[in-house]
């Protein structure tokens, strides 16, 4: 009798593990990083195509809303809207409408008519200077979001007085992030994160967890990692530590109070979590100007907020709203 060895049937091959694909490009005056999850290795090409389409969407929005492009739709509005109503694209009208709503919610903290002030201080072209009191007094009457007249039926914008000019630097980058995310979704990407400087939106989750780990900006630039977990939401941070200049030991930030014409002092950073990056970007600027106390009292129950304030004698202190997720420090 021949003995027969009992053989274990071969195990089926493991399905390919999900793969995180990350790419970056210099866009919007910063580096835009798009991370997307490929469910299986065979789908890598499809995910890369979707990421390329998302980058193209960001370039499309930049072409519409950039102050640095003479042929942008925004520049056409700035040149003509004081004389006649100007018909604009659905994208630009959507951003202008959101900006006016956020301006009203933040007492004009976000004010997209701030361009004469950012130009006067030299922040647009990084030709920094201290304006005189007389120069500020001459410019301030032109800065007020209520100078805008938006007509939904015709999708037109008109300036109610001459000299008004728009600067979408406090909100357009967030909208570009949203457009990139929606393009990824339309192409079948369920798990992704798009980051453009201090503006970020995450959908779904990474391959190795239930939520995306997001590193927050560090105003002190110590190199310490401060992170939160984020899923299906956007976060934006405005701060005084990136775009600024110093004269005689005094720091002048690019975030200007539209009512006084002066850079905001006494606050290092404001982070806001919202459903879309259009909201979080505009609110981060508007609430930075409004300040922690009024912001938390007015909108703290609706949005996640984190304010970082310099402490007298050195270091920083924080104020957070109940909806802001726990912060991990390493």
Image (cartoon, helix red, strand yellow):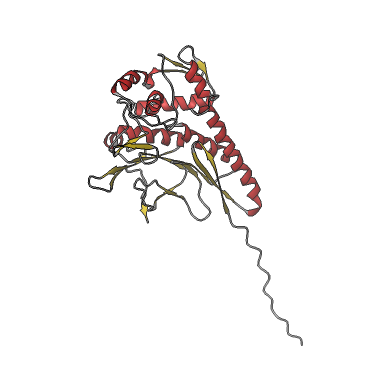
Q: Nearer the viewer, residue 4 or 181?
A: 181
Q: Nearer the viewer, residue 49 or 225?
A: 225
Residue 88 is situated, as x and y percent measured from the top left of the image, at 53, 21
The image quarter in which residue 257 lies? top left
Query: For the point 49% across and 33% down, which residue is it?
Result: 175
The image quarter in which residue 150 lies? top left
Q: Residue furthest top?
A: 83
Does the rendering let one see residue 125?
Answer: yes
> Is 316 placed left or right of 51 in the picture?
left
Q: Residue furthest right?
A: 1
Residue 52 is situated, as x and y percent measured from the top left of the image, at 61, 41
Q: Nearer the viewer, residue 208 or 128?
A: 128
Q: Look at the picture and state if 210 lies above or below 133.
A: below
Q: Residue furthest front?
A: 248
Residue 278 is situated, as x and y percent measured from the top left of the image, at 45, 33
- Which quadrant is home to the N terminus? bottom right
Does the rendering let one see residue 302?
Answer: no
Task: State how many labels appear.
Answer: 0
> Is 88 placed left or right of 230 in the picture?
right
> Is 109 placed left or right of 181 in the picture?
left
- Which quadrant is home to the C terminus? bottom left
Query: For the point 28% across and 47% down, which residue is it?
Result: 316
Query: For the point 34% across and 47% down, which residue is it?
Result: 220
Residue 300 is situated, as x and y percent measured from the top left of the image, at 32, 38
Q: Residue furthest left?
A: 313
Q: Nearer the viewer, residue 242 or 271?
A: 242
């Amino acid at each position: 009798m021949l003995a027969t060895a009992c053989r274990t049937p071969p195990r089926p091959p493991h399905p390919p593990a999900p793969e995180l694909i990350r790419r970056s490009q210099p866009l919007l005056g910063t580096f835009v990083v798009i991370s997307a999850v490929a469910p299986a290795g065979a789908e890598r090409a499809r995910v890369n195509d979707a990421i390329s389409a998302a980058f193209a969407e960001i370039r499309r929005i930049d072409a519409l809303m950039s102050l640095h492009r003479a042929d942008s739709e925004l520049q056409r509005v700035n040149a003509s809207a004081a004389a006649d109503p100007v018909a604009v694209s659905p994208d630009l009208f959507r951003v202008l409408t959101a900006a006016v709503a956020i301006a009203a919610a933040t007492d004009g903290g976000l004010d997209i008519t701030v361009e004469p002030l950012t130009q006067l201080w030299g922040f647009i072209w990084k030709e920094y200077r201290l304006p005189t009191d007389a120069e500020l007094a001459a410019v301030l009457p032109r800065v007020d979001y209520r100078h805008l007249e938006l007509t939904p039926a015709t999708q037109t914008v008109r300036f109610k007085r001459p000299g008004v000019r728009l600067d979408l630097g406090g909100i357009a980058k967030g909208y570009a992030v949203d457009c990139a995310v929606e393009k990824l979704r339309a192409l079948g990407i369920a798990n992704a994160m798009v980051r453009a400087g201090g503006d970020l939106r995450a959908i779904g989750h990474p391959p190795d967890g239930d939520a995306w780990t997001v590193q927050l900006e560090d105003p002190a630039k110590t190199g310490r990692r401060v992170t939160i977990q984020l899923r299906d939401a956007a976060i934006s941070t405005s701060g005084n530590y990136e775009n600024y200049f110093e004269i005689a030991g005094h720091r002048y930030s690019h975030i200007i109070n539209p009512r006084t014409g002066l850079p905001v002092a006494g606050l290092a950073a404001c982070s806001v979590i919202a459903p879309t990056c259009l909201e979080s970007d505009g609110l981060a600027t508007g609430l930075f100007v409004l300040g922690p106390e009024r912001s938390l009292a007015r909108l703290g129950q609706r949005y996640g907020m984190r304010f970082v304030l310099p402490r007298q004698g050195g270091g920083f202190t924080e104020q957070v709203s109940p909806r802001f997720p726990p912060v991990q420090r390493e």
